[in-house]
Image (spheres, coloured by chain):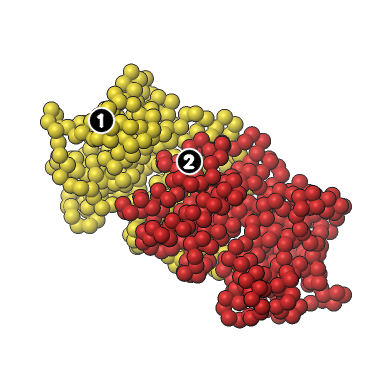
Chain colours: A yellow, B red
Amino acid sequence: MKEFELIDTFFKAGSYQRKDVVLGIGDDCAIADVPSGQSLVVTTDTLVSGVHFFADAPPEAIAHKAVAVNLSDLASMGAEPAWLSLSLSLPDADEAWVAAFSKALHALSEYYSIQLIGGDTVRGPLSVTITAHGFVPQGQALCRHNAKPGDLIYVTGSLGDAAAGLAILRGQLKTTQNSEDFLVNRLHYPTPRLLAGTAVRRIATAGIDISDGLLADLQHVLSSSGCGAQLHLEQLPLSVAMRESVPANKAYDFALAGGDDYELLFTVSADKRTNLEINLANFNVEATCIGQMTGKDGKIELRLGDEPYSLDVKGYEHFS
Amino acid sequence: MKEFELIDTFFKAGSYQRKDVVLGIGDDCAIADVPSGQSLVVTTDTLVSGVHFFADAPPEAIAHKAVAVNLSDLASMGAEPAWLSLSLSLPDADEAWVAAFSKALHALSEYYSIQLIGGDTVRGPLSVTITAHGFVPQGQALCRHNAKPGDLIYVTGSLGDAAAGLAILRGQLKTTQNSEDFLVNRLHYPTPRLLAGTAVRRIATAGIDISDGLLADLQHVLSSSGCGAQLHLEQLPLSVAMRESVPANKAYDFALAGGDDYELLFTVSADKRTNLEINLANFNVEATCIGQMTGKDGKIELRLGDEPYSLDVKGYEHFS
């Protein structure tokens, strides 16, 4: 396993350095301090080659996705990211691959001011597990279980782009080069909505990130909160690329059932709407109201204008 | 991936519940509080089927080893364990396997008063990644880099048992049934030396757990501390099973170069020896002085009685 120890050297230096890290990579454990008044927020996500990404995906894209999906989980709780632990399983000690992967990881650590504090490098089938740590002021975390009937439902950014990007890669969708680039980029380089999470955490009642698709993830909020929901399809935020690439009903399908968007969904009491909109504007965060929580426990009602709408797909295959 | 969501239910309930966990499994992240005055200590270890354990190993043994190797890292820093995150990669949704694995994991969480706070379950080749979290009073962590020439070198328990156990499984060593059972058990069910870590953390100058073998791990301390070491082989703690199974020189080889012991090695200033021995007795922790740090940077000198000793193996293959 000597070569794997050499591989470790790629991760030892190069990460962003935080003052709250007492001891970083190089001992049996890392040591770090959580600021007083803050709770620790922890999440773990594993990406497996051939399941969550294409086996020949560039190492930079794999690093980006592994970091982004974890930070998206932190964002959904309203947490600020702080530290990463990485476990990397590699079929062989491919130094060029690891050099590119670690360089991308270190660049992301700079961008998000987070520090890689430790991990493990082992021989095995290609997979990446990241445990991300963040902070949230005690009592302010956004959970799934506090939404109430009547709460407004918001989502950040635009929905369905990643699913459309996957359809393009699979040869199921063709559009203009610009739109293809945009949609595939949204699949490969999702953006964790960290600013949105911190902007709304004191106002919103519940939150989740949309990784499995709007309907699937909204369903988690409904189950946890004991509510139903009504969505207005004409209010779903769709990107220009989406609008110019597919007809409206196809765009709704992508937005409702497609995964890998990593936008945030959050709920807010109707009487806090102005308060929320002011906060969103202050933080320059784009979010759209797409419906309202109802008392119909576990049920999602779709409406297009004044009419009920039926989704004609059962859910897309997706990476997640 | 529906079946993998069902698999998740095995982990949702059954873990030991801690008061410092604000939100456990079931949301995007876990939330937990670190006690004031304590630093967070974090470690990650991955075990891959066929690399770190036999593919047909019982799920209980895999769970035990995955938890133990992580807790051993916490022990080596003098930390108390608190929370685990688990990422489990499974080739298929084998419910019986997961039921047995999760039951063993929950039993370990009870035994060590630690809580499984989250993780991920994915389809992929069999592997287990655990990130373990613990606490240590600020400034009291045992690191690798503070040993000084003249410091005494101690190890807990007995050395080489796991390597002898592996030799038995490989048909390279035969001994009595009792000794075989003992040695193989030491390989499959290592004991993290948590009590030893907390007993010595205010007295010892440096510490590490012995996972790669005494010489290899002592070398890490030497590199980090800029010291050398002299070891007295006749002082190496050997189990009764080891003594009755192999001649002395073979036992030394196992103890020096065999991995997977998960005993602790720590160093202590010679003038703190009595202080240390009192503490070990108070905590009922068994540890043996096996040598002393020297000024010969990076060099390990082996002595048997008054004579220099040469190790006639280059290092065993081992799981780790």
Image point 18% across, 47% down: which residue?
Answer: A313
Q: Position of residue B248 (x, y in %)?
A: 76, 78
Q: Position of residue A174 (x, y in %)?
A: 17, 52
Q: Position of residue B231 (x, y in %)?
A: 79, 68
Image point 40% across, 24% down: which residue?
Answer: A203
Image point 73% across, 77% down: which residue?
Answer: B244
Task: Give the crowd class for mark 2: few <14, some 14-19, many >=20 residues within 10 Å.
Answer: many
Q: Residue A296 got which mark?
A: 1
Task: Give the crowd class for mark 1: few <14, some 14-19, many >=20 residues within 10 Å.
Answer: some
On what subunit does the disc labeled 1 rest?
Answer: A
Image point 68% across, 40% down: which residue?
Answer: B138
- A28 lies left or right of A91: right
Report how far apart the C-alphas of labels 2 and 1 lie in the structure. 27 Å
- B31 lies left or right of B184: left
User: Type of residue at label 2?
Assistant: Gly
Per the image, the residue denoted by label 2 is: B24
